[in-house]
Amino acid sequence: MNRLLTLCAGLTLAATGSTAGADTLLRLDARAPAAAPTTGHVQLGTARSPQGHTLAINSQYLLKDGQPWLPVMGEYHFSRAPAAQWAHQLRLMKASGVDVVASYVFWNHHQPHAGAFDWRGNRDLRRFVQLAQAAGLHVVVRLGPWAHGEARYGGIPDWVVDAMPTRSNDAEYLGHVERLYAEIGAQLKGLLWKQGGPVIGVQLENEYNLRGPGRGEAHISTLKALALKAGLDVPLYTVTGWDGTVYPSGAVTPVFGGYPDEPWATSTQELPPKETHAFRFDTRVSGDLGAQTQAHAPGTAETDKDHVPFLGAEYGPGLPAMYRRRTLVSPDDIAAMLPVQLGSGVNLFGYYMFHGGRNPVTAAGTGLEESTLSGGYNDTPRISYDFQAPLGPDGQQRPVLTKLRPFHYFLQTHGAQLATMTVRAPERTPANPADLHTPRWAVRSQGDRGFLFFNNHVRQYPMPTHPAVRFEVQLPGGTVTLPSQPVDLPNGAYFIWPLNLDLDGVPLHYATAQPVTRVDAGDQGIVHVFASTPGVPTEFSVPDGLRHLPPEGGLVGLGSAHGRKVRVLVLPPEQLAQLQVLDLAGKRRLVFSEQQAWVANGQLQLRGPATQPLRASVFPALPHPKAAGLQVRQDMLMQHLELPATRTADPVLQVQATRAAGTAPPVLKGGLAGAAVQPVPEAFATAATWALRLPRTAPARTEDVLLELDFVGDIGRLFAGTRLLDDWYYNGQTWQIGLKQFALKPGATLSLSVLPLRADAPIYIDAAHRPAFAAGQTQVADLRSARLRAVRQGAITP
């Protein structure tokens, strides 16, 4: 950060105005008046809390305490995670810019047999919601009874599926659903919004497009009535809005989603460009999102568009690995969706999944995963529900999270303005998602203020560089043309630029950098943080001229307003990736760290490798930071904190091959999809195996130990004796398992088995990770590396 903050001397000042040249001028007319939001169509539950806080909805956006609200929502399944992790993982989500945590209640996790419900331990919904509230998160509970979620029978217990019709107004089925909802209502008593709690909404069913007697609108109406009978009186009642969904208009609000690939597809090749990377101007409904029932007519969401806001619940920050299709997405595949979806009008950005997990198993050892053996459309791992999520099953920070956080902080700071803005389409738009040559951009504006959204990234498809580009946006008060000089927009570029943004009294005509957040630095003034756009010169247009910054970013003053200085701090990508915005010691602060950072018990918490120092740079500085061994250093702007490493080396894992692979049987096709199906259990007799012996002494001063496995094959399974701890479909992603949750004895020996991957397997694996089979080689099962990584946590009192 030192180099970044000494670049102010390199700033230049130039007159505003455009320069003639051979521009590629991209035009958009945003002068037409926008329709005013309407109210009264959507039926809310009790929307006022005992403290006087309100939650409302109109036809365009959510309102919190009367102000527009554009939150970020992230899915985290409590019953797929150890209860001991919930508290700090929820705080990590909060620190990442998430405002709402959503979770399914999988019915078969709580009532495996007709009889008593189990809400203990990892199934303790009430405690999970209480911890979410303590972390400062709102909660949406996805009630089911059918959830999907890659769960066995969509989460409906076997004993229900075996005995009666489901997903309809069958009297016997509804009797059991009524009891389920009553149990959930009891768990959430006192925790609803109207009671001062965090639960602001519930979702009914999922991906529901079934029509006919006792189905369709009538079934969703019945489920809502049962939820109300169970005491689940909340402001928001939602249903998923894709794949021809059917619901009673006005009784519930649809939520939408999209993924950058389709792991549920049957193709073993790369798919055509997905619409999640193309702006949408006419519909909110994405294509196939993997619903397991087939729609036969357009759904209610299509006809409801002018009555309800564009809310999201399932935009994929990762993807699951299905047996037949094992897509591995890049951080840019995910992050490029955000300017596209926000620029298309999304006013709640909901992720599925934000935090990975693991499936529980029944007492008899039966898996609760979706599989073709139990009539599912997909085969998924028995245990693993990693989902390539930004936070892994054991809280690992994935690289994609560093790409997403700046967008979340942008919404925290500017979401209230953005929520009220109307989507505007440019003069030329791509003919379809496969049109890779027409520039992809949009504007959302209200009056003369707005944001410009641009995307030139499409998964697995190189995009052309758009040369010598300038944008011309016509607003009611005049035309904004930017940048001052034409710029080349390369393959992979995506960004949000502001138009006529008020920076605490300083008018910003435009910037070629993305707004991120704002901090009040006391006598140092107000600092607005922006992210530079790679490959594009950074300039800020203010009334007295242009401010230019070098590619490395820097700090520059824009002026003063109301007696206070207003400055901008521009971060290049490497610094932006380390930025976390935390409320600490009574102030919003910028915390730059390669490690995970969050706030608990009023302290700055850091988590990272035990063999490395825990480091953070803070602005504004903490008043009196204290911790054992803490080193503190102050430079021109930043306060640098460092806690020394607690280990010189990671624990040593002893690895020994114990069984060579046999010849794996051919991969069969079948199931509802008519595609590759997971091998039968007997096939694992051909797996190669290794013994993994843990150290005889438990590593001291560690928060967890991650077992990291890099193998190539078909399916990996990790056992302690005969107990299956975790499993993994090979897709090129490194497999990590946190060992603390299993309470293993020091010196314990684990067993790893790897089923060989056949060269002729009709399975999709990204080309970059599909094994290159040598001539005559028919299969592969290899453990390339296995190691332990110690993780520790440190706390700094401010």
Image (spheres, rainbow, N blue to C red):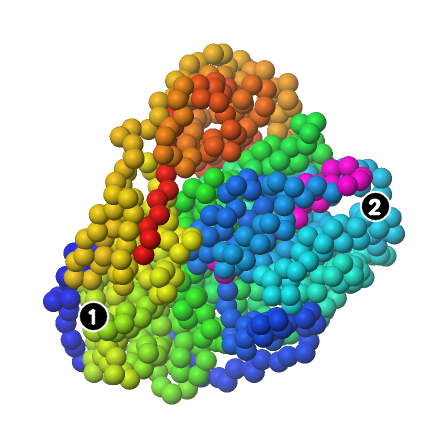
Checking the image for residue 556, the label placed there is 1
Residue type pointed to by label 1: Val
The residue lying at 23 percent from left, 65 percent from top is: 537
| SS for dot 2 | loop
Instruction: Quarter of the image for the N terminus: give it.
Output: bottom left
Q: Is residue 616 magenta?
A: no
Query: Distance between the Cα atoms at labels 2 and 1?
Result: 66 Å
Q: Nearer the viewer, residue 332 or 440?
A: 332
| SS for dot 1 | strand
Residue type pointed to by label 2: Pro
- As displayed, is residue 126 above or below residue 306? above
Q: Is residue 251 visible?
A: yes
The residue lying at 33 percent from left, 53 percent from top is: 797
Q: Is residue 566 left or right of residue 662?
A: left
- As displayed, is residue 491 above or below residue 733? below
Span colored in magenta: 98-116
Q: Give the image location of residue 739, x and y in percent.
A: 47, 31
The residue lying at 55 percent from left, 35 percent from top is: 384
Q: Give the image location of residue 668, x and y in percent.
A: 63, 26
